[in-house]
Amino acid sequence: MARDSLAPRRASALPLGPVTRPGLLWRIAQFSITRIVVITVASVLAQIVLSALLHPFAGDSRPIVRLLGIDTIVTVAVLVYSGMVRLLERRAASEFSVAHAPRELAIGILLGVLAITATVGLMWLFGTYRVTGTNSAMTLISALAIGMVPAFTEEIVFRGILHRIIEGSLGTWAALISTSLFFGASHLANPNASWFAAIAIAIEAGLMLGATYTLTRRLWLPIGMHFAWNWAQGGVYGVPVSGITVNGLLSSEVSGPALLAGDGFGAEGTILAIVVCLIIFLAAMVRVYRDNKLILPFWQRMRAAPMQTPDESAAA
């Protein structure tokens, strides 16, 4: 049976927007741009304040202190986002549904580890990655910060706020493309960044993580993938993470052509990562289409909505 590509999904199945309330201020608060700005600003300010409060402990080498700091940052990020969604949209933040967390986090972590392992494996096959030694297993704990903190804070902003709200108005493809471009551009200030590296991240991570969010409309799957990619890339394989040097369990040397070695930016700056992540993106989008989870722009949804006849309106 052919699927009607213009058929809108039931509103109850998607966290596309808040319940309307009377009053000018409330109507302004429900604008897509208003919600994007207010929730993003609140999330960023909370992280700035928290980082300042935790700064005295930043250099502490004790694993328990590091883990407590990471847990605090992640917990505050989730609570602030959930609180702003409750305040502005009058709904529970289903993007952080506790019931779905264990399974989707586990799948995301597995996929993330497999994706970065495949990428580094290809770098090894092409001769641009070489193991030179090993380090203490404690490096795995030290690398948790570069895995967990960006995974939660960036996924909240780029998928939980930008993708979700843009998708509710302009549709899935507009959300995927725009947030991928923003995601890539946000890495231009990183060490050893280049325009190619930013475009690579936009294509691979932006599209891949956006598609995995679209599959569930929850953040656990992309958070798990984002965390595992960063953590394994730096903490296990010793490859720079978006230009940031990390001591990993394996000491390594990365050298060779920029397209295959990342030019100091890391595995995500290679064409190999683009290929691996595009495969995952395409597989996720096949599922999105198969499960009819693609959201159309609002004007197509309005055009596709069935028109009531006068008799049907009277009966209603």
Image (cartoon, rainbow, N blue to C red):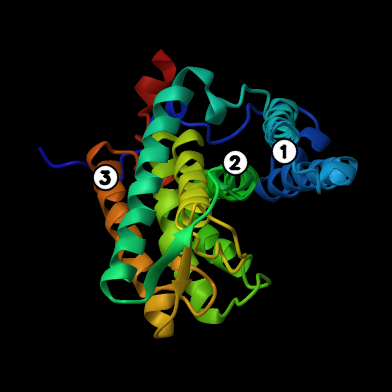
Question: Is residue 295 visible in this depiction of the protein?
Answer: no
CB under 8 Å between callouts 3 and 1? no
Where does the C terminus fall, quadrant-wise? top left
Ranked by sequence position, the earlier of labels 1 and 2 is 1
Expressed as whole percent of the image width and height from the top left, the position of residue 158 reads: 59, 51
| Residue at 61 percent of width and 65 percent of height | 245
Element under disc 1: helix
Q: Amino acid at mark 2?
A: Ile
Sequence-wise, the earlier of marks 2 and 3 is: 2
- The local crowd at label 1, few if under 14, some if 14 to 19, many if 20 or more residues have their Cα within 10 Å, is some
Find the distance from the CA under tag 1 to the CA under tag 2.
8 Å
Reading the image, the residue beneath label 2 is 141
Q: Mark 3 vs mark 1: give the one in front.
A: 1
Q: Are marks 2 and 3 in contact (CB under 8 Å)?
A: no
Task: State the residue position of label 3.
Answer: 289
**What secondary structure is found at the residue carrying circle 3?**
helix
Does residue 272 show up?
yes
Q: Are marks 1 and 2 in contact (CB under 8 Å)?
A: yes
**Closer to the camera, 55 or 108?**
55
Q: Amino acid at mark 1?
A: Arg
- Residue 272, percent across and down? 33, 70
Image position of 284 (left or right of 252): left
Q: CA distance from mark 3 to mark 1?
A: 42 Å
Mark 2 or 3: the one toward you: 2
**x, y (%) of residue 238?**
50, 60
Of callouts 3 and 1, which one flags the residue occurring earlier in the amino acid sequence?
Answer: 1
Instruction: Give the class, few, some or many, for how many residues have Cα within 10 Å of label 2's Cα (few <14, many ≥20).
Output: some
Farthest residue toward the top? 315
Q: Which residue is nearer to you in this view: 131 or 33?
A: 131
- Where 145 sits versus 125, above or below? above
Name the residue rendered at 38%, 55% in the picture. 116
